[in-house]
Image (tube, helix red, strand yellow):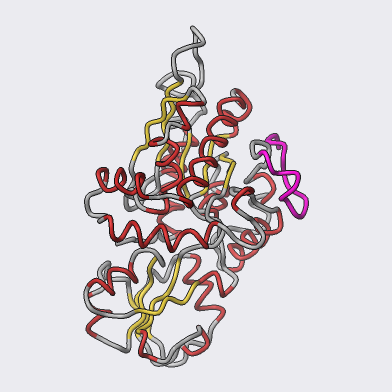
Amino acid sequence: MRHVIVTRLLTAVLGLMLAGCGTGNEHGDAGTNADGDAPVKVRLALNWYPEAEHGGFYTALVNGYYADEGLDVEILPGGPNSPVIQRVARGDVEFGVEIADRVLVGRAQGADIVTVMAPIQTNPQCLMVHADSGIESFDELKDLTLMMSSGAPWAIYLQKTLPLEGCKVVPNPGSVAQFLADEKTAQQGYVFSEPYVVREKGGQARPLMIADLGYNPYTSVLIVSRSTIEQNPDLVRKMVQASVRGWQAYLESPEDTNRYIHEQNPEMSLEILAFGADQVRPLCITDEVPLEQLGMMTADRWQTMADQLIEVDAIQAGQVKPTEAFTLEFLETSAEASTGEASTDPSP
C-alpha cells in the first residue's frame, strides 16, 4: 500500500539532508569512461517499491536499451519517505524518479534538481468510494469519513476546493480493511493499486481521480542534478532516450518486464502488475501527448503546479521558477510537442 509524504515532513527532511551538501559524487564522476568501451555505471533511485509506475525504466533495463547506450544502470528500489530528491541533489545517485510537485517543493528548499522527462501525464492519485454508493463525482462527497493524508498538497487542495459537507478527515490507515467494512468511507489510493486490492478482497471501489479536480502533477518523472546536466549532458541524453524507449515498449508489451518487477518485489503479483499496466497506459498516452512524444512537458503545466503549491502553502510565492524545474533539451520530439514557452536551457 502506498503512503503519501506529508509536505511538512518533506520540508524538514530536505532542510536537514541538503545542509552543507555539494554537487560532488563520492562514487566518482558519473559518465566518465577512460577506455571508451566499458559501460558507464549509473544509479537510478526510485521513490517507491518497484511497481507498474516504474515499468518503463525497468523495461529499458530488461530489454537492454540502457546497455545499447553504453550504460550500466542499477535501479535502486525506494519505499516510504525515500529521500530521492536529496540523494540526486547531493550526487549520491545520478538520477531519480519522483512526482512533479515534490520536485518544486525540493527546489524551494534548495535542491537544484531538474526534470528531464515525464512519462505519466495524468497523476494516478485517487480517492476511492464504494462502487454502490451512488457517488460518481467529487461534488457528491457528503457525510463520509475520508481516510487520507490530510497534509499532502493534493489533499489540502481537495479540502480547499470542495464543500465536503458532513465529511470527517482521518489519517489513512494504510490498508483497505476499514474501507471494506464501512460503506460511509472514502480512501486515498493510486488507481493502479488500491482499487485492485479492494476487488481482490471482495469489494468494489470507484476511483475519483484527483487530476479531475485540476491538481495534476506529472508522475514518475526522471530527475537529475543541474551539475550533472552541465558536466555530462551526453550521459543525460542517453539516459533520457533509453528511458523513453523503455516506456514506449512497456506500454505496448509489459509482460516480460512485469515478471522482472515481480522478482524484485514479490508482493506485486503478476495479476496486479498486469492490472497496473492497463491502468497506467491511458495515464501516459493522452490526446496532448501521443506515444511517440512520450515524456513531454509544458511550461503551462509546471506554472499551474507552482501556483497550486503556493495556494496550499507548500511553497512561498517567488521561491521557485517553474521553467527552471524542467528541460526539454534531451527529448527528441520537444520542438513538435511543447506548448507554451518551455525551458530548454538548464542554466538559470
Image quadrant holding the C terminus, namely top right
Q: Is residue 334 magenta?
A: yes
Main SS, magenta residues:
loop
The residue positioned farthest toward the top in the image shown? 35
Does residue 331 appear in this view?
A: yes
Q: Nearer the viewer, residue 102 or 22?
A: 102
Q: Quadrant of residue 201?
A: bottom left
Is 249 placed above or below 233 here? below
**71 in relation to 121, above or below:** above
Residue at figure coordinates x 57%, y 39% from the top left: 112
| Residue 169 in sight | no
Magenta residue check for 32: no
- Write down the quadrant of residue 26 in the picture: top left
Q: Residue at x 63, y 59 (%)?
A: 306
Q: Is residue 208 above or below residue 37?
A: below
Image spot of residue 259 (x, y percent) = 29, 46
Question: In this view of the protein, which residue sits in the foreground, 36 or 65?
Answer: 65
Tell me the quadrant of the picture where the N terminus can be found. Answer: bottom left
Q: Residue 193 placed where, x, y %?
A: 34, 64
Lateral position of residue 315 relative to residue 181, left or right: right
Q: Give the residue displayed 33% in from the left and 49% down from the top.
A: 258
Could you tell me residue 180's position as x and y percent? 25, 80
Region of the chain picked out in magenta, as a range:
332-348
Residue lying at 62% horizontally and 27% vertically, measured from the top left: 233
Residue 307 in the image: x percent, y percent? 65, 63
Residues 152 and 250: in front is 250
Dividing the picture into quadrants, the one containing residue 309 is bottom right
**Image-based side of 35 in relation to 199, left or right:** right
